[in-house]
Amino acid sequence: MNILLATDGSECSDVATRFLTRLNLSSEDNIIIFHIVSEVPYEDEYHAQIKRVIKRVAPKILSSASDILKNVKAKVSVAEKEGYPDTAIVESAVNLHADFIVMGARGLKGVKLLLLGSVTRAVVNNSPKPVLVVKRTGWETPRKMKVLFATDGSESAVATARLLATLPFYDDFEVTVLNVQRSDFFIPERFAMEIDDRMKETVAKLSKEEFAASEKILEEAKKYLTGKYENLQTVTKCGDPSYEILSTAEQTQADIIAIGCRGLKGMKGMLGSVSRNIVIHAKSSVLIGKAP
């Protein structure tokens, strides 16, 4: 497996780098530590000096990440490139045949709601490769890691399931597969008495059909994961997908939320509303799967 680790030397990048030390990597795996010397759009002497300083620091950034990974079994190499960070990361991931991109969630300090940095956001939006956005969570303490895989049965969800089946996670990872049915029939409990028996039968029938559809989606996802993970359970919920995924992630103390990028029709690369909400609001790390 080829992993492209994008680093800018920040604390967030170090967190992403340390995350890789928790994976069951082998000598067959490759980690490419990738640093971009940012393009300076001005050619005067002042900005030329800034660029020279940036280029002098680049080897130290790569060396620092290499030190963190010195005990992993994977083959570790470094690469440096000049350009605009988001474009360079996406292009290099494609050219180097990376299976997925790993990067830190460099947000805005002092803002309670995590707003992804512009580079992370652009890479998640535009990369044809899966992206793992690593956030600082409980995985740093010695315990089994937990993954919440949210699937809707779409092509991107199937691609995410296949990716999870090949990622070098340890077998004892706890994986919860979640499907959320967005029910068209929600009636507040205090008004339930107003429904006549005939309507109750209709609602019950539709609810049964929704759960049957959910079971089918979950069984399909399990085909890819059974045998890979010892601790595998499935959950069906009804309601708003974004809310239910984030809520379940907190309940299960998930270290990673894995979700497919369904995307918006006519807008190449743009995340759909659910995957966008998850990557922005989740406290845990987020793996965005991409359909081929």
Image (tube, rainbow, N blue to C red):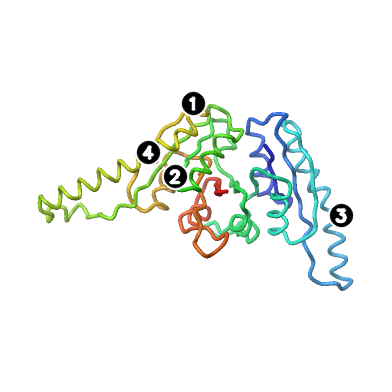
Q: x%, y% of residue 69?
A: 73, 36
The numbered mark at residue 235 is 4
* Disc 1, SS: loop
Q: Amino acid at mark 2?
A: Thr
The numbered mark at residue 230 is 1
**Distance between mark 3 and mark 4 Cα atoms:** 51 Å
* Disc 3, SS: helix
Q: Amino acid at mark 3?
A: Arg
- As drawn, which residue projects farthest toward the left? 197
Near mark 3 (Cα within 10 A), the count class, few <14, some 14-19 or many ≥20, is few
State if disc 4 and disc 3 touch (CB < 8 Å).
Answer: no
Q: x%, y% of residue 106?
A: 63, 54
**Distance between mark 2 and mark 1 Cα atoms:** 19 Å
Q: Amino acid at mark 4?
A: Val
**Distance between mark 1 and mark 3 Cα atoms:** 47 Å
Q: Is residue 119 left or right of residue 233?
A: right
Report the residue at 55% width, 27% height from top. Answer: 171
State if disc 1 and disc 4 touch (CB < 8 Å).
Answer: no
In the picture, residue 2 is in which quadrant? top right
Q: Earlier in the sequence, mark 2 or mark 4?
A: 2
Q: Earlier in the sequence, mark 3 or mark 2?
A: 3
The residue that mark 3 highlights is 56
The numbered mark at residue 151 is 2
In the picture, residue 70 is in which quadrant? top right
Q: Earlier in the sequence, mark 3 or mark 4?
A: 3
Q: x%, y% of residue 186?
A: 25, 54
> Mark 1 or mark 3, which is nearer to you?
1
Residues 89 and 23: in front is 89
